[in-house]
Amino acid sequence: MARVLLGVTGSVAAIRAPTLVAALTEAGHEVRVIATAAALRFFDPASLPAGALVTDADEWRFEGSEDGRWRREDPVLHIELRAWAELLLLAPLDANTLAKLALGLSDNLLTCAFRAWEHPRPVVLAPAMNTLMWESPQTARHLRALLEDHGVEGAELPRARTPGAYLTRFGGPDCPHVHVVGPVEKRLACGDFGVGGMASVEELVAAVGQALRAAQDLPASTLSSKD
Ligand SMILES: Cc1cc2nc3c(=O)[nH]c(=O)nc-3n(C[C@H](O)[C@H](O)[C@H](O)COP(=O)(O)O)c2cc1C
């Protein structure tokens, strides 16, 4: 059981955010949710437990500040959330935010929390996008960049142009604390048929449990994050 920070991005699969939060809670986890502005177009914030959701507006809201400016005694929300969380689950992870994470961009609450994340605390990524977006060599490049950034030093990675080539490398010896739950093949909301649908809620809850167990088993010496 863990404190899970769930990042929700602007994929149609964000409609399942309330169900995912309920399932994680049912599994015994404490859940807080960061939703991007695009993600908020897919579900009703009122369908989440009170107080669970934080957004960009919260990051920039400083209670009692008369001019709206940050004061020295005010919190920095993305750092507080990072300190609170034991595991980061990005589900759904859309193509745009994946690209931002790969580049290190940090222009909203979610990407700041990822950029400030304390590796090797586990991260679980659940991409969801149109099939052609998923099959794009850009997606492979971005997954590879994340693996290289957070994997074991010196790992030999394939130069493949398809993202599937990297799925089995995540969560394995090359990258023991960043896990990817690959998208599934289905008729997508856009009408296309193919790979790109977010994995099931059950699979995501199971992946969170596996990632937490794997993190407990990891000897600190196998990780490169503290160098
Ligand atoms: C109706 C609709 C559905 C979308 N579904 C997806 C999707 O499943 N996956 C994806 O990568 N982008 C999808 N997009 C595009 C993203 O919402 C868009 O790139 C947005 O800028 C993402 O912002 P964010 O990464 O900050 O959440 C969709 C856009 C719309 C309008």
Image: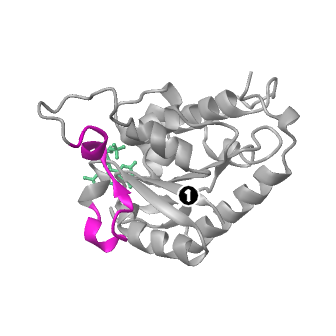
Q: Which residue is mark 1?
A: 4
| Up/down of 132 relative to 23, above or below | above
Q: Position of residue 221 (x, y in %)?
A: 87, 33
Q: For the magenta stretch, what is the residue range? A: 42-63
Q: 189 or 206: which is nearer to us? A: 206
Dividing the picture into quadrants, the one containing residue 59 is top left
Q: 67 or 97: which is nearer to us? A: 67
Would residue 106 be found to the left or right of residue 140 on screen?
left
Q: Quadrant of the N terminus?
A: bottom right
Q: 89 or 173: which is nearer to us? A: 89
Residue depicted at 67% across the width and 68% down the height: 206
Label 1 crowd bin: few (<14), some (14–19), many (20+), radius 10 Å: many
Dividing the picture into quadrants, the one containing residue 83 is top right
Q: Quadrant of the C terminus?
A: top right
Residue depicted at 59% across the width and 74% down the height: 202
Q: Tell me, yes or no, if residue 125 can be seen here.
A: no
Q: Residue furthest bottom?
A: 26
| Up/down of 81 relative to 73, above or below | below
Residue type at mark 1 is Val
Q: Secondary structure at mark 1?
A: strand
Dividing the picture into quadrants, the one containing residue 120 is top right
Would residue 222 be found to the left or right of residue 94 on screen?
right
Q: Tell me, yes or no, if residue 136 can be seen here.
A: yes
| Up/down of 190 relative to 22, above or below | above
Q: Position of residue 102 (x, y in %)?
A: 52, 31
Does residue 119 show up magenta in the picture? no
